Image: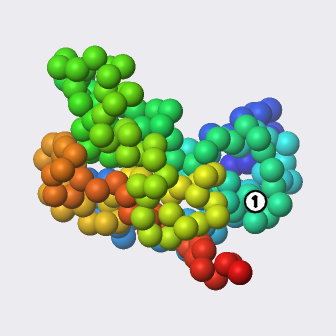
Amino acid sequence: MIRFGRDLGVNDYQIFFPVPTGRAQSSLFAGPAQYEELIREVLVRYRDAPLNIRPTCAPQFRRIADELGIRNNSWGKGCIAGITYCRIFANGDVTPCPYLPVSAGNIREIPFKEIWNHSEVFTRLRDPEEVRGKCRVCRYSTMCGGCRARAYRGAGALTSGWCDGLVHPGDPGADLSGEDPFCTYHPEETAG
């Protein structure tokens, strides 16, 4: 695809990494090792081709780039859900991203500015002390932090299913703080 794009004169390459949601079967998606290998392959091709790669829903991208000695200051922090990005449904419900069925509020009831600045959901997503597991102790946490939607699904929180509506802070299964199950990096192996 990169070679084809180069032949066409393409400069930017937007790579979207799928996030399993709702009733999607995990068997349809690459596993963590395949996901990591795909990112490595994309980065090696990026290094060898004059293209601007824009990763989406791949917070581990910067960690893997760092491990390969590849730098690009235009790549932002990993997961931006509720930090610089959110989704507003037609009915006014606000969620951190399309893959997190957790309501931060509704703009028909609360002004957007109030939701954005003070909702429990967004406040927790912006607080690195809220993250648990290996993501909390990882030296790459400020550039990666893991995908909150993958962490949410990885914790088994979607047992009732995305199609059944939004959950709210305090509801069973509304936890966004777990570690990203798609990350193969183990901080303890590099400590010391």
In the rendered structure, the answer to whether residue 37 lies left or right of residue 151 reads right
The percent coordinates of residue 49 (x first, y second) are 84, 48
Q: Which corner quadrant of the image does residue 155 belong to? A: bottom left
Q: In front here: 135 or 62?
A: 135
Q: Residues within 10 Å of mark 1 (few under 14, many from 20)?
A: few
In the rendered structure, the answer to whether residue 178 lies left or right of residue 66 reads left
The percent coordinates of residue 29 (x first, y second) are 43, 64
Judge whether 167 appears above or below 130 on screen.
Answer: above
Say if residue 97 shows up in the picture: no
Say if residue 2 shows up in the picture: yes
Q: Amino acid at mark 1?
A: Asp
At mark 1, the secondary structure is helix
In the rendered structure, the answer to whether residue 140 lies left or right of residue 166 reads right
Judge whether 106 appears above or below 184 on screen.
Answer: above
Q: Which residue is mark 1?
A: 66
Q: In front here: 7 or 190?
A: 190
What residue do we see at 42% from left, 64% from top? 132
Q: Which corner quadrant of the image does residue 175 belong to? A: bottom left
Q: How many marks?
A: 1
- In the picture, the quarter occupied by the C terminus is bottom right
The percent coordinates of residue 166 (x first, y second) are 19, 42
What residue do we see at 30% from left, 40% from top? 120
What residue do we see at 26% from left, 45% from top? 101
In the rendered structure, the answer to whether residue 138 lies left or right of residue 81 reads right
* Scheme of image coloration: rainbow
Judge whether 91 appears above or below 14 on screen.
Answer: above
What residue do we see at 73% from left, 58% from top? 65
